[in-house]
Amino acid sequence: MKLFNTLTRQKEEFNPEKPDRVGLYCCGPTVYNYAHIGNLRTYVFEDLLRRVLEFNGYVVNHVMNITDVGHLTSDADEGEDKMKKGAEREKKTVWEIAEHYSQAFLEDMDRLNLLKPHWKPKATDHIQEMIGQIQKLEANGFTYVGENGNVYCDTSKFEDYGKLAQLDKQPFRGGEAGARIEVDENKKNPHDFVLWFVESKHGDQEMQWDPAKWGAPWGRGFPGWHIECSAMSVRYLGEQFDIHCGGIDHIPVHHTNEIAQAEGATGKKPWVKIWMHGNFLVLKEGAKMAKAEGNFLTLRRLVEEGYDPLDYRYFCLQSHYRKELAFDWEGLTAARTGLRRLKEKVLALGDSEESLAENYMGPFTEAVSDDLNVAQGLAIAWELVDDAEVPDADKLATIKKMDTVLGLKLNEPIEFELPPQITQWILERNEARELKDWKKADKIREKIEASGKWMVKDGPGGTEVRPN
Ligand code: AMP
Ligand code: ZN
């Protein structure tokens, strides 16, 4: 297998630390709101990575954290706490917000057919590990306490700080942003970042801990965002592991700081062998999609518009994870048509399976193992189903094997989710029909069909609604 490593900016032959076993860490969601479809694109990419690794025979230990504390609206320690903002918006406690949006995220993962990580550690359950890592950094001389009481990481003490983002080849990252946001006077160097926040700055923060419980001298407070990933990944995958993933926005700050923390604490280099980053989903006008900006698309919204979550998965599969992907509704509609046609062809193959069509399986394996060229894999799946020379039973066996990577549920009947309002109207219409109130039943049919997205049919079980 070949994978593109952000650290070396090259495609590399993949050789895991332990033969056949792969440690995989993926930065998880900050659970203060629904995930937007941009976030979900990154999780689709990570799912493809996991599936391709397993397809190649590796046993993967997959960890994805849940960020429920410490993530500020700017990655560089400025702005408000994201969880607190969510709680204020919805007049709930931060704990309730975390619970609600974690559940919603897991549902989204399920609907996109993303394999479940083996571990989903929550930041708030691992304060001890984070404090432990900060203590090690302190012992190794990489920290200082500011006048405000916060514990900072001293980035000038690392010889190779910023190697992932190649910061030595670029001007100070965030230079322009620094002009707009308040600069933290307590920092010795511009790239320094907070490991432990104390009460003083965020006095009304609900999530707080007293580090004295674990023998640390700093004030009561909460961890910085970056420390959670380095502390939890070491806890679940060991001091050195194979692959760490996230979106490209994490290269200059979050992942750069994670490397400093982990390597500074353990002294072992490299902490992570391969860094992989998914490029952004943007809206067609070129704007990136940001959760903090309020106006963003969720998977729920796509479902309300009559799409199946797997239509969105298919949409993502058509482009390479390292390329920016522009979203618009026409593109999603085309993906829906593509997925339905492919499914119809697969469903028409019957249900007996014979041998794998090696002349298709070989190129498919080669494509997906070449830095996840899944778009090419999908094209090969299409060629296979359209090849009149291959017997149906071989096609079915082969396509099912390919689908362990594609994850499109190709041999399952087409399913779609109805928005709650439509479900309600179906109930009301069935009731009206039972009472032989045909006028009312017709009115409800009109309401269901008014948006042009849904079509009503009367079946043996009553009202049936399908996407138009
Ligand atoms: P967050 O919940 O903000 O921590 O983000 C979760 C994941 O989504 C991270 O890996 C981000 O890098 C990634 N991400 C954020 N915005 C986008 C976007 N527009 N397109 C793709 N990935 C994104
Ligand atoms: Zn992370």
Image (tube, helix red, strand yellow):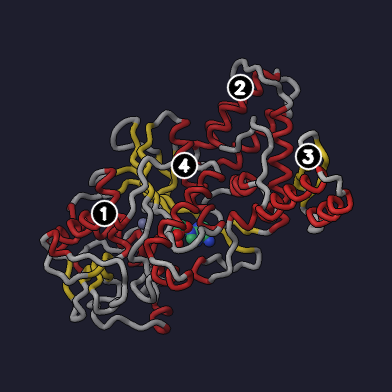
Q: Position of residue 110 (x, y in %)?
A: 52, 44
* Image quarter of the N terminus: top left
**Can residue 225 be spotted in the picture?**
yes
Residue extending furthest toward the front = 435
Q: Disc 4 marks which residue? A: 49
- Alpha-carbon distance for marks 2 and 1? 44 Å
- Alpha-carbon distance for marks 3 and 4? 43 Å
Which sits in the foreground, 322 or 60? 60
- Alpha-carbon distance for marks 2 and 4? 22 Å
Mark 3 residue crowding within 10 angstroms, few (<14) / some (14–19) / many (20+)? some
- Alpha-carbon distance for marks 1 and 3? 52 Å
Q: Position of residue 355 (x, y in %)?
A: 60, 16
Of the image marks 3 and 4, the number of the one nearer the N terminus: 4
Q: Disc 1 marks which residue? A: 126
For marks 4 and 1, give the one nearer the viewer: 1
Q: Amino acid at mark 1?
A: His
Asked if the residues shown at circle 1 and circle 3 are in contact, with their CB atoms under 8 angstroms apart, the answer is no
Q: Disc 2 marks which residue? A: 397
Q: Position of residue 28 (x, y in %)?
A: 41, 54
Badge 2 element? helix
- Alpha-carbon distance for marks 4 and 1? 26 Å
Q: Disc 3 marks which residue? A: 462
Q: Residue at x 61, y 22 (%)?
A: 397
